[in-house]
Amino acid sequence: MKYPKFFALVLTIIIAVLIFSNEKIISKDNFIIIENYLSSFTLGVFYAYGFTAALATGALLKIADQQNIVITGIVAGFGSLLGDLIIFRFIRGSFNDELKLLGKTRPLKKIRKFLKKYSSLNKVVPIIAYIIIASPLPDEIGVSLIAVYKNTNTKAFSILAFFLNTIGIFIVLLIGRSV
């Protein structure tokens, strides 16, 4: 198989859709594993990771009318922030030496030259990254894009990641409440 990770990601999304769209598997009456805000925090952590984002989104849709969505959204937002901080610190710490080596390669030098020529693109990449973070898409992509920007500090990243993830989670909860 040429793209096993993408296949696994698509498979988790399909499984989540099948699980959460089938009332025989999970109905609102028997969906009791998520009755407290600790579970909302855990769902927030899962919301941040590609392979668990679809399942977390499905669970958030299901619990939207069982809990206070303001508290659930904020608590899940903190969980998602924790997940994003783990990714952010991992990319910044573990990949720092490889990123420096990669920055010296010819393709990246060309990309850097292109970005210097079209400096407005440097402003677009972080915006795209933060949109990815706010959505149920895998946060690893958005966080990685932000982590490689040397001028992004952890505090600023944390504030934006919490805010954007919480907005994304609120949207999911509002959709779940309206369905």
Image: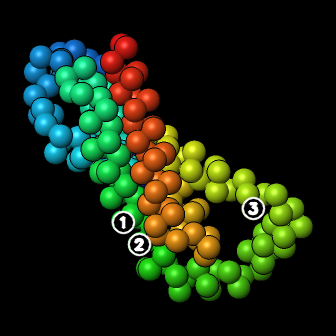
Q: Decide which of tag 1 and tag 3 comes sooner along the chain.
A: 1
Disc 2 to disc 1: CB gap under 8 Å: yes
**56 horizontally vs 160: left or right:** left
x and y percentages locating residue 21 in the rendered image: 31, 19
Residue 86, numbered label: 1
Q: Residues within 10 Å of mark 1 (few under 14, many from 20)?
A: some
Q: Badge 3 is on which residue?
A: 122
Q: Amino acid at mark 3?
A: Asn
Question: Where does residue 117 sit, x and y in percent of width and height?
Answer: 89, 67
Which residue does the numbered mark 2 point to in the structure image?
Answer: 90
- Which residue is at 78% across, 78% downward? 109
- Which is more N-terminal, label 3 or label 2? 2
Q: How is the image coloured?
A: rainbow
Residue at horizontal 24 percent and vertical 46 percent from the top: 41
Q: Residue at x 21, y 27 (%)?
A: 67
**Residue 152, position in %: x, y?**
57, 69
Q: Could you say whether the residue bearing mark 3 is in a helix, strand or loop?
A: helix
Q: CA distance from mark 1 to mark 3?
A: 24 Å
Amino acid type of the residue tagged 1 in the rendering: Ile
The one of 21 and 67 positioned closer to us in this rendering: 67
Q: Is residue 31 left or right of residue 167?
A: left
